[in-house]
Structure formats: structure tokens, C-alpha cells
Amino acid sequence: DGTTGSIYASPGRINLIGEHTDYNNGFVFPGAVDKGIMAEIKPNGTDKVCAYSIDEKDYVEFGLKEEDAPRASWAKYIFGVCREMIKRGVDVKGFNTAFAGDVPLGAGMSSSAALESTFAYALNDLFGDNKVDKFELAKVGQATEHNYVGVNCGIMDQFASVFGKAGSLIRLDCRSLEYQYFPFKPQGYKLVLLNTCVKHELVGSPYNERRLSCERVAEVIKAKHPEVESLRDASFEMLEEVKAELKPEDYSRAKYVIGEVVRVLDVCDALEAGDYETVGKKMYETHFGLSKDYEVSCEELDFLVDVAIDCGVTGSRMMGGGFGGCTINLVKEELYDIFIAEEGDAALIENAENKGASFFALHAFDTVEHDAGVAHALGNRQTALLQHGAVGRARLDGHIAVLIGQLGEQAGGVTAVQLLSGQVACFVPGSEFLDECLVLIVVEQ
Ligand code: GLA
């Protein structure tokens, strides 16, 4: 109909320390990053959602009732957010949407939370007069995971995506939801993510089993110490006291978690004192715990951490849920080039032997602030809407289009072509749903 929709964006996250502590009511220490998901959304006056994933090149329609759940896994997140917003009294109606992102999928950087909070914000803004508060928006994302995706995750990812602030990490107490921003500008160090490119899928992964292990141990301890509601409240002494009653596996899981809750607080103290050596030491401890006791690492992650040790990197560990994804590394600036080169060489050699990680360096990134309901630039990117007719064309002087797959590539019937002089033309060869959907193109300056 020629009108444009609104644009919403939410960031992915990193986590300095505090892994698998959130659902144990402990502390986490995440920050939102300059990579995220961006969506254009326009109410369509029906009760149907028409959604196009630019990255997956997939189009899905679904209704808004509980029984209307779509089959495509990416669409379940959007459907879940709609349902959870409806449960909170928001009168969600049909809309058209197209979305894309630059958080690497399955890299442990919470692309799914970014998607959830993008839509939670949007629906609150478009249909709810922004009456749902930010805490609840984070919970909408978490409930989507629990009820529509099947991952019994904690609150960390959605919280970080909604509450992120530029230049800061957030220490979050996952029991009280009290949080504190920690300015994070390490002098002389860089934070670097290395991606194993082993895609982690928490759906159907042992993630939910880990959570159950923790809850079983907390129950056993609670029988002797009624004040213990979760592993957050437990000590190593309490754990030893009930060791004989536990499966060895559950014991190891709990041992990791109890140590990790304390490590987050230690790292906060060390950061305040500017003591990065301690921060790094704790990161390695976390990795070994996650790898040996919690058993959520994989060969490729362990490999990247081993190379970090060999290079003399200050701290390195797997990040996020595990079973693939990235390592997060605290690297002295003067070591950065050597580290990247050595990781690259080592990965190449390992690949030649066909057993190691393929990897790429995600350069050091910026943390970002999530601006409620407003389209904001992700890094140095901006969005532009290319309207279409039979043949659409938009001028983006001075910009270079980078998304919609590759330039010249077809995405959902749309071909984006870069013209001389930096203009971009967008050709829509008569695709049905695109009559109603606008095309979102992300441009880089
Ligand atoms: C995933 C979950 C989070 C958290 C981390 C591990 O990212 O979504 O809730 O449990 O794993 O720290």
C-alpha cells in the first residue's frame, strides 16, 4: 500500500563471566554488542502475521491463536513473542514483517534473544501503548524459549539484550533482578571472540538436562538446609555433605555452578581494581569447569582455548550455553596480532588433519545501548527502506548496500543491485507477498 512500517532493533550479547548461573539464581556479567537483529514491522489490519526472514530467505504466515504455531523454527520465536504479549494483555493484531541480523547464528551470542526482544519491543509499541515494562519484555523472551521453543533458559540473554548500555557490562543478580552497570574499557586489552563455527543448538541439546541436574542437587541440599532454594545459596561444604546421595554427574555439575557464582563476584572486584590478570585467570577457571565438570564444551572450543594458553593470552573461555559457538578472549593489545595469526595458523593445521576448529576472528566489538522502540544504528550500519512497485528503486547516495544476501542475489524474489555512484536499485519481479511487505536493506556507510 505504499506506506512504510516501523523499524526495531535489538542487540545480541557477550558474557564476560557467569555461565549457567542464571537459572541457578546466581550472578551473570553480560553486555549487549553492536551486532543484532533488525526488523521492519507494519500492522496489516488482519489477524495474520506475514513474516519474511531475509537471512533464511523464508516466508511464513501464521495466525495469533495458540493452535496456530508455525513449523519453521525461526518463526516460532516471533509466534511465541506474540502469544506471550497477548497473555500479558496486549491486543496483538496481524502484521507484515521482514527482518535480518548480523549476530552470527548459533555462535552463543544470543541471536534468538535479539529476535525476541526486537519483537517484544515492537509489539509493545505498536499494540500495547508501551505498557509492558522492560523487565517484563525480557521475561516475554524467556517465556517464549520455555513455552514455544523448548529451551528452559535463564534470563541472562534477554536481559542483556533489553538492558544493554554502551560502554558497559551489566552485573545481574538473577534472583532479585538487581543490576549494576560496570563501565568496561579495559586499558591495554581487547576482548576478542573466536568462532569455532560449530553451530550450537540449545533446542534438544543437553542444556535442559544440565538445568535438571542442578535442580536435583538443590533439592537434596534443601532437605538438610531449608534456606537453600537453588545452587546460588549452596556452599562447597553443603555439597560435600550430600555427596553420597548424588549421582557423580550431578555432583560435578553442582561443583562447577557453586564455584562460578563466586567467580563472577571475584571478577567484579578485580575489574574495579583494574586487575585484569585475575579477570583472565578466572575466565580460564570457568572454561575448565565448563569443559570438565559441566561438560558443555566441545573439542573445537577446547582447542581454541589451548591455543590461547600457548599464546600467553590473559583469559579465554567458551561463552554462552556451549556445545559450539565462540570463545571469549581477554588479550593484551600488543599480543593481539600474534594471537590472531597463531590461532589462524593452528586452526589451519588442525583442519588439515581434519579434527580441529575452523574459526574466524570477530574483531573486538562495541557494547551498545538498547533504545526502546527506536530504530538505531547497529555499529556503523543504517537501514533504508526500499519501496517497491513492479520495479522499485531507491537512492542511497553515498552508501553501499551490504545485505539481502549478496548484492545481485535474489532474496525472496527481490534482487538488490548496486548501481554506479553508490545508488541501489531494488527489483521486485512480481512476488505475491511482497505486495504487502516492504524490503529492508541494511547499508554500510
Ligand atoms: C544460554 C541461555 C542462558 C544461559 C547461558 C549459559 O545462552 O539462554 O540463559 O543459561 O546459555 O550461561
Image (cartoon, rainbow, N blue to C red):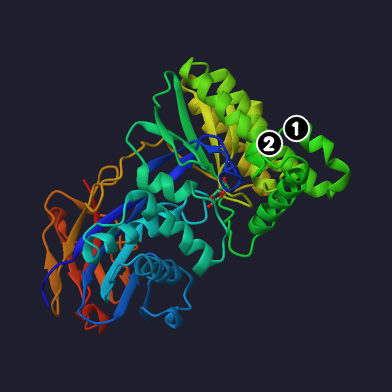
Label ID, residue 236:
1
| Dot placed on the residue nearer the N-terminal end, 1 or 2 | 1
**Distance between the alpha carbons at the discs numbered 1 and 2:** 7 Å
**Location of residue 417 with respect to 443 vertically, above or below:** below
Label ID, residue 258:
2
Residue nearer the viewer, 274 or 176: 176
Q: Residue at x 17, y 62 (%)?
A: 385
Residue nearer the viewer, 445 or 104: 104
Amino acid beneath label 2: Ile
Residue nearer the viewer, 244 or 221: 221
- Residue 414 sits in quarter: bottom left
Q: Residue furthest front?
A: 226
Q: Residues within 10 Å of mark 1 (few under 14, many from 20)?
A: few
Q: Residue at x 70, y 47 (%)?
A: 299
Q: Is residue 335 visible?
A: no
Left/right of residue 51 with respect to residue 107 in the rendered view: left
Amino acid beneath label 1: Phe
Residue 117 placement (x, y as % from top left) = 37, 56
Instruction: Find out whether the residues at labels 1 and 2 contact each other: C-beta distance under 8 Å.
Output: yes
Left/right of residue 164 with respect to residue 436 in the rendered view: right
- Residue 419 sits in quarter: bottom left
